[in-house]
Image (spheres, helix red, strand yellow):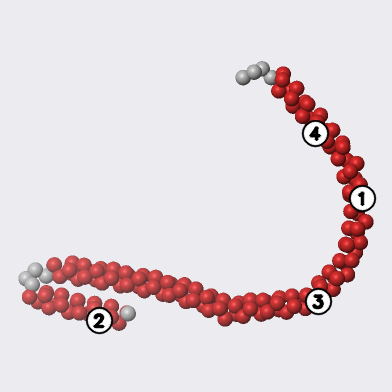
Amino acid sequence: MKFSCVAALLVVLTVTRGCDAVSLVRRDAPSDVDKLTQLIENMSASITAATQEMVDKMKALEMTSTAHAYSRTKIQPLVEQVQAEAAKLQEQVKPYISNIEEHIRPLTDNFNSHVKPLTDNFHQQVKPLTDMMEKLFQQVVDQSKALLPPQ
């Protein structure tokens, strides 16, 4: 990069020097050289900035690519391994769950057989009370409607 800038500067200086020999007015040459030098410096700065920006973008892209590759190569096998272990544990627990269900079913059946008569008896005793409350509420509603002015 520096070599190309130096080479370009030498070419510019050579061209302007040759123009000086032909030119009758020598005072224009230094201003032209200054302009060309400034132009080359601006181009060099612009190219350097663009190159640095491109390098930064490539680094960011490389990091993203590396993260995706790491995810696929490291994390995905771990996920699959966890899923396989979960399936194994589920298969191992199934007999225990079945065994617990077999032991609890007689207990729940026995509980239901004792509680069912009690709940039926409670329902029979409460039913007349609920019927009476429904009639009372219906009378209150009817009387309240009677008190309302006609619409």
Q: Residue at 11%, 70% (x, y): give it.
A: 26
Residue 134 is situated, as x and y percent measured from the top left of the image, at: 80, 33
Name the quarter where the C terminus is drawn: top right
Q: Residues within 10 Å of mark 2 (few under 14, many from 20)?
A: few
**What numbered label is drawn on residue 95?**
3
Badge 4: how crowded within 10 Å, few (<14), some, or many (20+)?
few
- Ranked by sequence position, the earlier of labels 4 and 1 is 1
Image label count: 4
Query: Toward which corner of the image does residue 86 lie, by quadrant?
Result: bottom right
Q: Which residue is mark 1?
A: 118
The answer to whether one can see residue 37 in this image is yes
Instruction: Tell me the CA gap for discs 2 and 4.
Output: 108 Å
Give the Cα distance between marks 2 and 3: 85 Å
Question: What residue is shown with label 2?
Answer: 7
- Pointer 2 with pointer 1, Cβ within 8 A: no
Instruction: Tell me which amino acid carries mark 3.
Output: Pro
What residue is shown with label 4?
134
